[in-house]
Image (cartoon, rainbow, N blue to C red):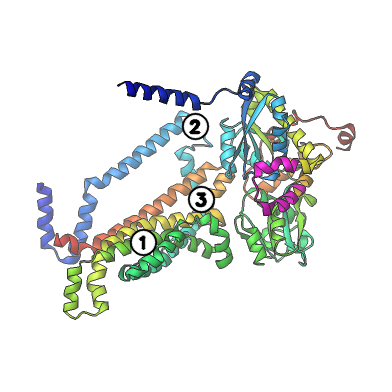
Amino acid sequence: MKNFARLFLLVILVILGIAPMPTAHNVQAQDDELTKVTLFLSYIPSVQFAPIYVAIERGYFAENGIEVEIEYNFDEANGVDRLAINDLQFGIISGEQVILARSAEKPLVYVMAWYQNFPVGVVVPADSDIETPEDLKGKMVSLPGFQGASYIGLRALLGSAELTERDLQLVPIGFSAPEVMCERQVDAATVYIANEPLTISQCYDVRVIPVSEYATLVSNGLVTNEETLESNPELVAGMVDALLRGIADTIEDPDAAFEIALPYADLPEDQIETQYQVLLNSVELWRADVLGWTSEEAWEATQQILLETELLREPLDDLSAAYTYEFLPKLPEEVVEEE
Amino acid sequence: MTSLEIQFKRINTKLSSTWRFGWQIIWRILDWRLFIAPMITYGIYRYWLHTAESGRYPKFILPHPDTVWLRFQEMYADGSLLLHLKVTLRESLSGLLIASVIALVLGYVIARIRILNYILIPYLIFLQAIPVVAIAPIIIIWVGPDIKSKIVIAALITWFPLMVSTIVGIRNVSPQLREMMRANVANPLQVFWHLELPSAMPEILGGFKIAVTLSVIGAAVGEFISSREGLGYLIVVGRSISDPASVFLGVIILTAISLTLYIIVAVIELFLLRWKRAGS
């Protein structure tokens, strides 16, 4: 019996010994009372999210009283639904998804542009005779599917050349563009221009026709919901501020941003060089005179494409309710005058 | 035995083989137990209706049954539903056909030549364990992005349970009966046709019941990856344009196809295995 009591005491001591003790860091966090926020990203950990990692590591979120936890999830539609029911408060979501969501009475609001330039384009072999969107006529062009940002971007590109889907052969291939292009099974592929052309260029030299050179569309942005906007505008302002600072830092010093992003992206050694180039390509998508802004024309154009493709049945009653500039830094005088 | 069952047996014994099969089908339809599943389905429908009307979930998460019904009518009227249905059916049945040929031949050979069990099975399990999404780009490169890639994906998802059930069925053939046929100088084809195939039929048909439902899932998975037509495409687009009515419609029709194919196999089973019931 005595031995049992000793053993019991020993077990208790061991449990107490290995139980986590409150550290100075934990105590600090509790004292600061940071608001925990989950940020939905519809991709894997990647250097393309470097500004977020920069904002976390440099304490920009913490300065605004926010503790960010990132949720990586391929299913953007799931993120949209959860934002709509306020199960999530923030996500980086495609612009056209916000219009489609609002048409289904999902109260999403776009508060800040993530990419300033639409991240989709058409990639062709460098020796291809396709140089402009007009040259796509009669060609076989792949795309991930007949929905989403890639499809919208391609349709805008075709529209700029006064082409329709009937003028070329569209082939849905999912996210297999690098493999299909390397095998030269299509003449051109609709891709995300930050990373996919780099993968294809491992097979042969390529040339990219970016959608942003021919059409102004709303690209991915920070999206929240009406409930969060009304109940906690300070939180939204804090998120926007931290992300804009992260983007500005990344544009200013991509090398430092890449170093910060590396542990998050957890890259194999042989991928580091390629991914550094992916970051540099992304920097070009982020770069703008004033960060975070979208134009009303871009929203109108995006809605128009959705209507033309019949993904949207009728225009929104109030398109301007889909976005707000309230949390963005003021536009400089010269930009306002230009507009 | 109830008086009704005695009555059934009495009528059954008086009928010829073909009429007896028809009578058995009618008897089956009249079986009260067959009404349990529709009653449960009706219960689920009522629960769906009640939950949708209670406003517990917004309609973009859980659409009202009437909205789904309206979408059905719309898509039926413009012919798009029939088009999606035809495409998915063609993909799943073609996939099932290819999978059946491969699985039955491979299953038979593995069951009969024991050494192949040790050589092939690890690779076949490996093949089965690969997530289709991971090899989708290779499939698209090999067979092209058109309907063929969806058929291959349906076949890949379908063949394994069919092969395993064939192996089990052929291995369960009575060694005494096999010996008896050999003693009567039956050639291998006769042994296969008169002994192995009938003996293994219950297991093979069991495998088919699983395979038909998997073939529909396989076709839909293929359409999720890349397509412009089919019920899987309807679901993907419905999700991406915030149209839950189309998603629910796609899911309900996929379920209905699976159920119909399952019932067809069950009826075939009833016909092919009537000798077994007569024997027992």
Badge 1: chain ID: B
- Mark 1 is surrounded, within 10 Å at the Cα level, by few (under 14), some (14 to 19) or many (20 or more) other residues, namely many
Q: Which label number is shown at residue B57?
A: 2
- Mark 3 is surrounded, within 10 Å at the Cα level, by few (under 14), some (14 to 19) or many (20 or more) other residues, namely some
Q: Which label number is shown at residue B103?
A: none
Percent x, y for residue B25? 23, 57
Instruction: Give, as a three-letter code, the residue at label 3.
Output: Met
Q: CA distance from mark 1 to mark 3?
A: 35 Å
Q: Would you place residue B217 above or below residue B191 in this image?
A: above
Residue nearest the viewer, comparing A333 with A249: A249
Badge 3: chain ID: B
Residue A76 is covered by the magenta coloring: no
Residue drawn at (45%, 23%) of the image: A13
Percent x, y for residue B170? 28, 66
Q: Nearer the viewer, mark 2 or mark 1?
A: 1
Residue nearest the viewer, comparing B230 with B187: B187
Residue contact between numbered discs 2 and 1, judged by CB atoms under 8 Å: no
Q: Nearer the viewer, mark 3 or mark 2?
A: 2
Asked if residue B177 lies left or right of residue A156, the reply is left
Percent x, y for residue B13? 11, 61
Q: Provide the residue designation for mark 3.
A: B75
Q: Which label number is shown at residue B162?
A: 1
Percent x, y for residue A186? 66, 65
Q: Nearer the viewer, mark 1 or mark 3?
A: 1
Residue A228 in view (yes/no): yes
Please tell me whether mark 1 sits on a helix, a strand or a loop.
helix
- Among the 4 quarters of the image, the one containing residue A88: top right
Q: Which residues are magenta?
A: A257-280
Residue drawn at (45%, 54%) of the image: B217
